[in-house]
Image (cartoon, rainbow, N blue to C red):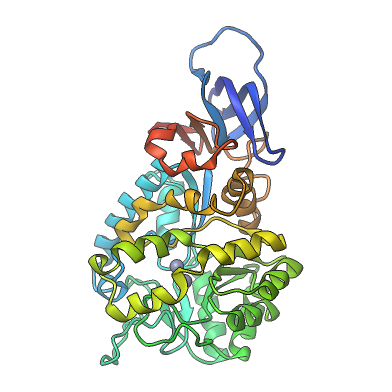
Amino acid sequence: MGAVVRVRHTSFVDVAARVTRPDHMIEWRGDEIVGVGPDDGGALIDGDIEGAGLYALPGLIDCHVHVTSISADEWADSGHPASYVAAHATRTLAATLRRGFTTVRDAGGADPGLARALGEGVITGPRLFTCGKALSQTGGHGDLRPRGRELWDPHPDVPGIGRITDGPDAIVRAVREQVRRGATFVKLMLSGGVTSPADRMDGVQFSDDEVRAAVSEAARLGVYCAGHAYTPEAVHRAIELGVRTIEHGNLITAASAALLAARGVFLVPTMATYEVLGTRGPELGLSPQSVQKLTAVGGHAVEALRLAQEAGVRIAFGTDLLGDMSTAQNLEFALRAQVQPSWDVLASATLVGADLLGETGRLGVLAPGAAADLLLCRADPGQDVRVLADPQKALATVVSRGLVHRV
Ligand code: ZN
Ligand code: ZN
């Protein structure tokens, strides 16, 4: 079973109760929390971690990352050998953990082999939930071919965020293939996007029958569908057809927010990516037409978050950063804090993320029976969540799967 490890005299950031409790003790054995409560006042024993002056909170959850992206030029990325991409992903995953994220959901591109290597301790990084390749129609957001190219290599081990599939029958088969390879959810490209060369931002992608086929097949297999969507048309239709999470949602209206809330659909805003692409896009490989598309959605990110917050939508934490942009992952905390109170931002990155992943009570919470993922922070993020925007300054220790990492 292994020894019990304890953090002593720490302040426990209780996200569910929205309060920070002083002089607490958190105990875990292996990868499981076994105790959270007031410190027993006993002497420090061997193996105890002195937590005085530090704030203990659950490890963070980012529900929209792309750990296999190397740059913002996804077509160029797909030309690299898979081994090279895996080596980059290994570095990205280790850095992600140092930023305090102990769980991430990859929204397209990550092979379940990475999740296995992480779980076995072959490489260091967060828990990884994968969808394999995102499903896209021909000419949709996952079709990265330059307009003058016809060839597309459909081999599943070719790096890339998406795969092309058209027609309900083909989509059912694609869902089955992703799940066979280890996907824990299905990602659907349901509207135009910034990085795709051939689609319009206001276009709605896949027919209703295609979306219905994917949603019902996913449900039969015990997984859910996530939908990339920006416009009210794309978002409303996705909700009506049974998609469980809306990714981005920048152009939503008050009516969209009300519908999201009424149906209990999760919204995963990804504000950091617009911020970073807006300032560094071209240097990172973003094409001129993508820069144009970016300006159509980037400016609406704050307003969309405000509408969702006011409507009581279940808002998860996402970033959608590609390649080196992921160094800006924690900027999302500062961007969310423009609209949401600190406790709500914290809940997004812990409790809500766990609910979205179907891991309520196991992830995103410090309580007996939960996974041993926690952070020791030098300031109270419940008071001001923006401290997490600078992880090197804020984080003293990251505990992941029960293992202690000094930042
Ligand atoms: Zn997307
Ligand atoms: Zn994405």
The quadrant the N terminus occupies is top right
Q: In this image, 253 relative to 187: left or right? A: right
Is residue 127 shown to the viewer in this render?
A: no
Q: Please state which of residues 299 and 14 is positioned toward the viewer in this rendering.
A: 299
Q: In this image, 17 relative to 74: left or right? A: right
Indicate the position of residue 83 as horizontal and vertical percent values: 26, 61
Q: Residue at x 70, y 41 (%)?
A: 16
Indicate the position of residue 390 as horizontal and vertical percent values: 40, 41
Q: Residue at x 43, y 58 (%)?
A: 272
Is residue 300 shown to the viewer in this render?
A: yes
Q: Please state which of residues 124 and 140 is positioned toward the viewer in this rendering.
A: 140
Q: Please state which of residues 305 and 239 is positioned toward the viewer in this rendering.
A: 305
Q: Is residue 146 above or below residue 183?
A: below
Instruction: Report ligand 2 position as a quadrant.
Output: bottom left
Q: Is residue 168 above or below residue 300?
A: below
Indicate the position of residue 88 as horizontal and vertical percent values: 28, 56
Image quadrant where residue 5 sits: top right
Image quadrant where residue 162 sits: bottom left
Indicate the position of residue 224 as horizontal and vertical percent values: 62, 69
Instruction: Report how many numbered discs are placed on residues in the image.
Output: 0
Instruction: Give the farthest residue toward the right.
Output: 262
The quadrant the C terminus occupies is top left
Q: Please state which of residues 1 and 156 is positioned toward the viewer in this rendering.
A: 156
Instruction: Give the farthest residue toward the top.
Output: 43
Q: Residue at x 62, y 29 (%)?
A: 12
Q: Is residue 61 above or below residue 275?
A: above
Q: In this image, 332 relative to 352: left or right? A: left
Image quadrant where residue 260 sits: bottom right
